[in-house]
Image (tube, coloured by chain):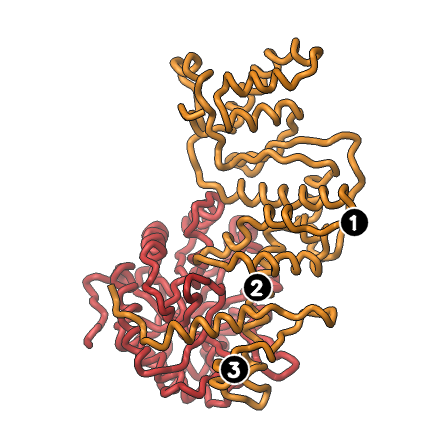
Amino acid sequence: MDRSPDIECLRPAGGLASHALGVGLRAPHYADVFEHEPAVDYFEMISDNFLGAAVTPRRVLARVRARYPVVLHGVGLNLLGHTPLDEEYIDALCRLADDVDAPFVTDHLCWTGARGVTHHDLLPTPYAHDLVEFAAERACHVQRRLGRRFGLENLSSYVAFRSSALTEWDFYSTIVREAGCWSLLDVNNIYVSSQNHGFDPDAYLAAVDFSRVLEVHVAGHTREPSGTLVDTHDHGVAQAVWALYSRAWKRGGPFPTLIEWDAHIPPMTEVLAELAKATEARMVT
Amino acid sequence: MTREAPHWLADFQARFGDVIRTPLDRTSGTLAATTSAYDPRIVTDILDSPTGTGADRLAVYNRQYWFRLFDVAQRAFPLTSRLVGYWVFNDYVARYLRVRLPRGWDLDHVVDGFAAFLEDTFECDDPAKRRAWVEAACIDDAWRTVFRAPEIPPFRPSATHPRRLLEARLVPSPALRIVSEHRPLLELRKCLLHDSSQAFVEMPPLLPRARWWALVRRDHGILQISIEPREAELLVLLGETSVRDALARVERECAPEERALLPAQARDWLARSVQLDFWSGVSSEG
């Protein structure tokens, strides 16, 4: 099924340069941002934190948006969930995206809940052929509802299923293509999954259509005593991930790049220093 | 509308969900995943790896589920969790989440109802300490409720209101909560918000007498306003019954020496409550 991006229904990416560097903005940094207005090209805000009725988060969001472009990154879409998409959630997401004039909106290729129970985690499925069309149709629907570019993020995963019929990269890339949507490529997640499951991360990169990459995420991870890598977002970015980022840039740059740091959050100056490594990584030959 | 999911997906996700919600074992003194309790139909579909079996890998999600929700609850109940201690607090969170599974996308709603659950189930041989812990939970819950309340214009009585007001019920603002404390818990809560140590905190001593507070959200933050016990009683009744009835009931509760002062006090309390945006409107249903 041809679901090429219907350009007429999509707002332009507007204002986000292809070399842009951004930060996933978290509450400990609000005061710093309001006082010092750090030199950041854009911020990413977690959609779900701003969809409710609470007044203070909305005011914070408005203040940030008054000074910076804001993209929205969600965790609650449940795209691979077995139940119908939550249209009320999508309604709220559309309103929020319009309010901040988000250049694009992203969420994850995952499920979060089943039979009415939400796990508040990004959960994997087997990479099954019959999930591809299912997921693609839902992603296309979300993008049409949003009226702007919608990006799907690849997960980091800790389990590989015997019943998978496809590689993760084929599953992910095919869904993005069939949906006519975009990729939010998380290179830390590629690295984490590659180490956990023993595949070559460059094979993953080779399968990515970089003409459909909206943005790249980098983040830190943690190695558990067992050796399993977990996507904890509580450290700076590992050297191996920066190296993978360099190779991704060489393959398909330029693309906006954002650093996520969600736990043990250091001062903004330290986050920005880590983000600056992206510039160095881009210049590696 | 998009197509239905493949037929196997619902069953897979239900089973996987059951696995990751498996309670963590506490008997060793640390929280540990009980991989032997996992559904074998899920376990056998997970490939082993050099760093662990399929069950070990599933345990990553199992621990992540519980620790994320413990963290959410600790942040939502900062006073309670530090007074009770995280080990005991997490146990009650786990018990709560087993009877009230998380639903909906909003993580903030996961602990709606936890304060009431704690009041019903908290086990403690010392009644005074039990009361303190329950009060702490009510205080934490009041703060989060006031913070998250939607913005609704405050009630401002018009010239025609006074005559009808006596027969009407005042509708409390969703951004208002009345709390009481027999120990300086609100003061302690403020200190803890600047203390990131996560250490257990000793129970503060009893106050000479109980204190009542109104927590109300204003533009610049949440106001904590000291109120008299009788004022608290009136404010609660004003939200439950007509103004006339509320005043009558408070008067009946007053000692003779209080009754003489009540009309002037009630007028002042009512005026202040309107001025401080305690009400969002009036209702004809008393």
Residue A73 sits in quarter: bottom left
Q: Secondary structure at mark 2?
A: helix
- Are the residues flagged by discs 2 and 3 from a single subunit? yes
C-alpha separation, residue under disc 2 versus residue under disc 3: 25 Å
Is residue A173 depicted above or below A116 in this figure? below
Q: From mark 1 to mark 3, how far is it between C-alphas?
A: 45 Å
**Can residue A194 be seen in this snapshot?**
no
Quadrant where the N terminus of chain B sits is: bottom left
Disc 1 is attached to a residue of which chain?
Answer: B
Give whichever of B216, B67 is nearer the camera. Answer: B67
Give the residue pinned by disc 2.
Answer: B68
Q: Residues within 10 Å of mark 3 (few under 14, many from 20)?
A: some
Report the front residue among A266 and B12: B12
Residue beneath disc 1: B202
Residue A163: give x, y in percent of width and height.
41, 86
Q: Residue at x 46, y 16 (%)?
A: B166
Chain (orange) = B
Residue count near mark 1 (Cα–Cα under 10 Å), binned few <14, some 14–19, many ≥20: few
Comparing A70 with B41, the one in front is: B41
Left or right: A4 as drawn, with respect to B72 = left
Three-letter amino acid code at the position of disc 3: Pro
> Which chain's residue wears label 3?
B
Kindly identify the residue that appears in the image at 64 percent across and 23 percent down.
B230
In the rendered image, the quadrant that contains the C terminus of chain B is top left
Give the Cα distance between marks 1 and 2.
Answer: 26 Å
